[in-house]
Image (cartoon, grey):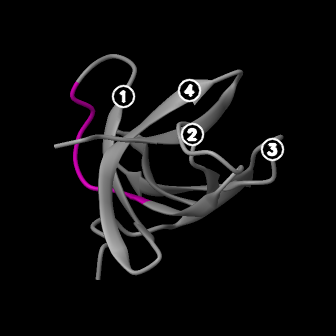
Amino acid sequence: MMQKYRADTSSPQSDGATVWHAKWWGGPSLAKIDNCRLANLVGDMRATVYVTGEADTWFSVPAVCRIRGCRVRGYVTSEDGDLVFRHCYY
């Protein structure tokens, strides 16, 4: 199971993805994104992306997804007003 945070509320994005947030006392926190665009992969690939930790910089949140059975680590960032996933090579 890759999901770390509960997903309480959802909202649609303009690109067709569904963004899920966990409700906390400090406000909503990003939990997962269904049908998220994988920005740096060819072919307009999409997957469910799960947030794995707190934001490590101002503009990125560590995340993970599964592509053809392989666990791929990366981060969620904003691109043209929508949240997208970018994989890392480590």
Q: Earlier in the sequence, mark 1 or mark 2?
A: 1
Q: CA distance from mark 1 to mark 2?
A: 10 Å
Residue sitting at x 48%, y 67%? 7
Residue sitting at x 27%, y 32%? 55
Could you tell me the amino acid type at mark 4?
A: Ser
Tell me, for residue 15, which label it has, or none.
3
| x then y, percent, for residue 15 | 80, 44
Q: Are marks 2 and 4 in contact (CB under 8 Å)?
A: yes
Q: Earlier in the sequence, mark 1 or mark 3?
A: 3
Q: Is residue 88 above or below residue 12?
A: above
Residue sitting at x 83%, y 40%? 14
Q: Residue beneath label 4, please? A: 78
Q: Earlier in the sequence, mark 1 or mark 4?
A: 1
| x then y, percent, for residue 52 | 26, 55
Q: CA distance from mark 2 to mark 4?
A: 6 Å
Stretch of the chain drawn in magenta:
50-56
Residue sitting at x 65%, y 59%? 10
Q: Residues within 10 Å of mark 4 (few under 14, many from 20)?
A: few
Where the N terminus falls, by quadrant? bottom left
Q: Residues within 10 Å of mark 2 (few under 14, many from 20)?
A: many
Q: CA distance from mark 1 to mark 4?
A: 8 Å
Could you tell me the amino acid type at mark 1?
A: Ser
Q: Earlier in the sequence, mark 2 or mark 4?
A: 4
Q: Residue beneath label 2, please? A: 84
Q: Is residue 48 left or right of residue 63?
A: right
Q: CA distance from mark 2 to mark 3?
A: 10 Å
Tell me, for residue 60, which label it has, or none.
1
Q: Is residue 72 above or below residue 44?
A: below
Name the secondary structure under disc 2. strand
